Image: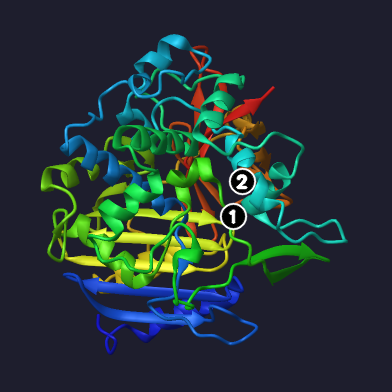
Amino acid sequence: MTQQTVTREFEQYCQELVEKYEVPGFSIGLAKDGQLFYENGFGYRDVENNLPLSSDTVFGIGSVTKSFTCIAIMQLQEAGKLNVHDQVVKYLPEFKSPNEEYTKQMTIHHFMTHSAGLPPLPTLFKALSKSVANDPTFDDGEKPEGDIGLVQEEANKKQSSVDTYEELIADIAEQEFTLLGEPGTQFSYSNDSYALLGTIIERVSGVTYEQYIKDYILVPAGMKNSVFHLEELDGHDDISCLYNSRKKDDKTIVFESNNPWDAPSMRAAGFLKSTVNDMLKYAEIYRNQGRVGDAQILSPESVEAITTPYIECDKDRYYGYGVMVTPDYYGYKLIDHGGAIKGVAAQLHILPEVGLTGVAFANLAGVPSTKLLYSAFANYLGKSIKDSHTSYEEVELSEEELNQYVGDYASGEGSKYTVAVEEGKLAVKAEGVTIADIKPIGNDTFIVAFRESELGLRFVRDENNTVIRAAFGFRQIPKVE
């Protein structure tokens, strides 16, 4: 799969999805054994001025930042300054949750694997509130679509901001919530856990989180256009504008909203900016046993620990340390992570056994960057670009069985949806959208087809066999009585 042999079918598919989802700009790069062999851009980094994309265009990478956070933790472990199995309260003695016994059991490992038992919390809204306040507002009362609209709505509510790690820890301590279970037993994606990892990195290293990432990862790896603050890009003006979308009169309007969100207390969870070229250098850490060029960023043993599948996070997919692991992606081990925040849809893929790495960026959230990178990898392996690497067998459930799941689900992080039964099938309704392509595949488990992807939906029961939560979008969402 070179510039000449990338199938026209794949490039047509990219163009098709870019047009379907009205993506202002989409950029993709693929490397074999560390050498870029395919790059392409669809659309623009700045639509109004017709400015093109390149492999040096700076995009937000969202939650792909979490993988940097875990590399920092592993470096500190290699230096003998901490151990991933240390209790969190050893470094954050003031950290509290509603369950004191479980709090004492929580380890750095649990934070890294999203298995500490923390449910989705509203802390992120408070951390974002000051920067979200600078977003445009509309006279018609409409708000941006999807999760971005939810974040904006919640962040704009009258509530105290959370700007420092100390305020973050104090805010979590004051919240009322129920832990999902004993640490290590329940997976639920937690931005709070990663923010707290940033706190640990600062306290152990003696420098700010951002400075540590720069000194020990970005600079050694030669990632010269990767920053937390765009002002640091001295003289580099190849920066993507940010875009958002909203509904008006049943039409989707994509508009420029070039105000990057920031959350100082949450930077370890998702606020780095980077480029295709820089992220392909970064991917070498996972492909090349911790080595980027002449720099040994991590030991091979630490890379092995990072890419170990510790806890299932979706069907046939597991979470390691800051990355997701698919043990059988067409017979190979796939390492990946995505990122989504306003104006960002980012994806990083690595197939170490094949020597293949890939990065995809879009400057609009909620668009299928992940699907397109999966398609590029499938194309490279000689598979159909539209097929899925996962397989499942649909099972039959009666309407009575489906009714067990019916109800409203809501999390502290803003997700709200209703599960209903329509025409004998399960349906999920959120933000005025109904997702009806939902197939039962096993014990309380379903596959949801949404925006070109197949997502797992799993219902969690208590000791009385009553459905109490839904695991969807990597998060466990409580059922509302």
Q: Are marks 1 and 2 in contact (CB under 8 Å)?
A: yes
How crowded pointer 1 is (Cα within 10 Å; few <14, some 14-19, many 20+) is rated as: some
In this picture, is 312 found above or below 287?
A: above
In this picture, is 172 found above or below 141?
A: above
Nearest the viewer among 451 and 52 is: 52
How crowded pointer 2 is (Cα within 10 Å; few <14, some 14-19, many 20+) is rated as: many
Q: Quadrant of the C terminus?
A: top right
| Secondary structure under the numbered disc 2 in the rendered image | helix
| Label of residue 261 in the image | 1
x, y percent for residue 456: 46, 44
Q: Taking 352 as reference, is 149 left or right?
A: right
Type of the residue with mark 1: Trp
| Residue 115 visible (yes or no) | yes
Q: CA distance from mark 1 to mark 2?
A: 7 Å
In this picture, is 210 found above or below 463?
A: below
Nearest the viewer among 42 and 157 is: 157
x, y percent for residue 242: 59, 68
x, y percent for residue 48: 65, 83
x, y percent for residue 40: 39, 81
Q: Taking 365 as reference, is 268 left or right?
A: left
Residue at image position (55%, 28%) is: 469
The earlier-in-sequence mark between 1 and 2 is 2
Label 2: which residue? 128
Q: Quadrant of the N terminus?
A: bottom left
Q: How is the image coloured?
A: rainbow
